[in-house]
Image (cartoon, helix red, strand yellow):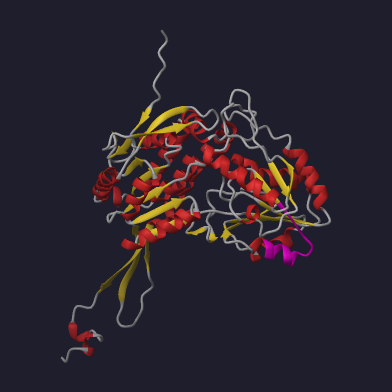
Amino acid sequence: MVSIAEPPCYNHIINGQDTPPKENAYIDVICPATGKIIALTADGDARDVDLAVEAASTAFKNKDWRFMAPEQRSKLLYQLGNTVLANAQELAQLEVEASGGTIKRVMGLDMLAIADLFFTLAESIKDYPFIENLAPKLLPEQVNTMVVREAVGVCGVITAWNFPLLLLAWKIAPALAAGNTVVVKASELTPTSTYRVIELFNTLLPPGVLNLVSGTGVKVGDALVRHPKVNKISFTGSTRTGKQIQTAAAETLKRVTLELGGKGAAIVMPDANLELVAHGALFGIMMNAGQACESASRLIVHEDIHDELVAKMTEAAEKIAVGNPFDPNTGMGPIISEQQFNKIIAYIDSAREQGAKIVCGGERRHVAGCENGYFVAPTIITECRNDMTHACEEIFGPVLSVLKYRDIDAAIDTANDSVYGLSAGIWTEDVVEAQAIARRLEAGSVWINDWHMMRTDAPFGGMKQSGYGREMSELSLHSYTEIKAISTAFERDPRKKSTYQLVHSF
């Protein structure tokens, strides 16, 4: 009789050790391509969080870690980045199976970008102004004043399921680079690759510097946000949850960085290269099946080129290979869960009900060998208005809303008419004019003639209800440091101190 292997079980990692959850409870991890259980992950609670925070708090008191010289910390960051590259195949397999991201993207983009971020920060901290000496001032007397940037302390990191390792790196790389200690709350939907990379990193880090607690937002996330010994929270996820985190963090005045939802708008000018736009706009929305906060979900097209561009995009969309994410030929994989799949279909149905036109897609796609997978066909919707539900709310799926415009001022107004402000773009042959338009768009990142143009030495983050704070680049270190001024007086004779004479008589 052939025995069926039990799925692997993933615990917490606390103080460098594999640690079972206090309740001994676990959550099924489902492969979105097949609907099968692929692993079990710890269903943690406040006690597990408390244990991890205590470990991180103790580790932060280690002066060798907290005040490590930038040159030594730079070498460590290089080691962490190289660890990702050395284990990229294993990490990618875990990520694809749990998240549904394509192997082509995870190996061809994510792994390289993760390592590159560690390398970028490894160079940045060599010259980062951890200590600045201010110029002397004559009044009230000559003193030396240093402005010091120090680690915040224990950082709570809450990542999302759509790019588990990439988003993790965006947070822990600057946190570690600045000398903090970290407690990670992994998404219960995609915990496997996060567990493995933190396990690998713990072979290089002192115990307690990097901890992992898995579980739900209700039990683990909330406990982490409210914990009195956590000094900072960095969260990526929905705007609704971000607002709740901001409110809860206010109880202890935690520092908070929020990278939230988006409804990216791209303006297509009459002179744009339509072949480039057809493929580029679809890349902007179909990558990771539209499950990216900065996706180009609104395309604002000049009326003179609207029909021709829609025809080109429809032809290109129908050629996108939707299928098994492990197939290197697949361009678009599944939706993360049945719940998210149903949400996307409901948005498409609402578009029909409100008078929009589905020109391609709009239905479930069946994939051989993945019959229980949650696949949505690439969808393009025209005859949209900016106040339609599908055109103004974040769908988080492979759904492109196309809107017409007549003059550029109206197009810019439409792009900015959103509660979100994460990404925006312009397609045109006049890149000089595009620079001027970019300054008028209310978004943290504006891309001209492409999309998803994120680089590790450039900051990324949102405006309005897309959040605040910036990730990646040297600027991300600002969010993980506190500023302290240290002044030293040199005059020893109290009679010669002019300020003392305001109180004392000599």
Q: Residue at x 31, y 61 (%)?
A: 252
Relative to 256, residue 290 above or below:
above
Viewer-proximal residue among 468 and 34: 34
- Residue 75 lies in quadrant: top left
Quarter occupied by the N terminus = top left
Q: Is residue 63 left or right of residue 85?
A: left
Extreme top residue here?
A: 1
Q: Position of residue 401 (x, y in %)?
A: 69, 51
In the rendered image, the quadrant that contains the C terminus is bottom left
- Residue found at the very far left of the displayed protein: 506
In the image: residue 309, left or right of residue 33: right
Q: Quadrant of residue 497?
A: bottom left
Residue 393, position in %: x, y?
59, 54
Residue at 71% across, 45% down: 380
In which quadrant of the rendered view does residue 264 lie? bottom right
Q: Is residue 112 visible?
A: no
Horizontal side of 212 relative to 343 (left or right) equals: left
Which residues are the magenta region? 402-414
* Residue 80 falls inside the magenta stretch: no
User: Which of the pair 128/224 is nearer the observer?
Assistant: 224
x then y, percent, for residue 60? 27, 50
Answer whether residue 111 is visible to the viewer in this image: yes
| Residue located 36% across and 29% down the image | 9
Q: Is residue 405 magenta?
A: yes
Q: Name above or below for residue 324 compared with residue 421.
A: above
Residue at the limit of the structure toward the bottom, as seen here:
505
Q: Position of residue 24 (x, y in %)?
A: 28, 34
In the displayed orientation, state which residue is furthest to the front: 353
The total number of labels drawn is 0
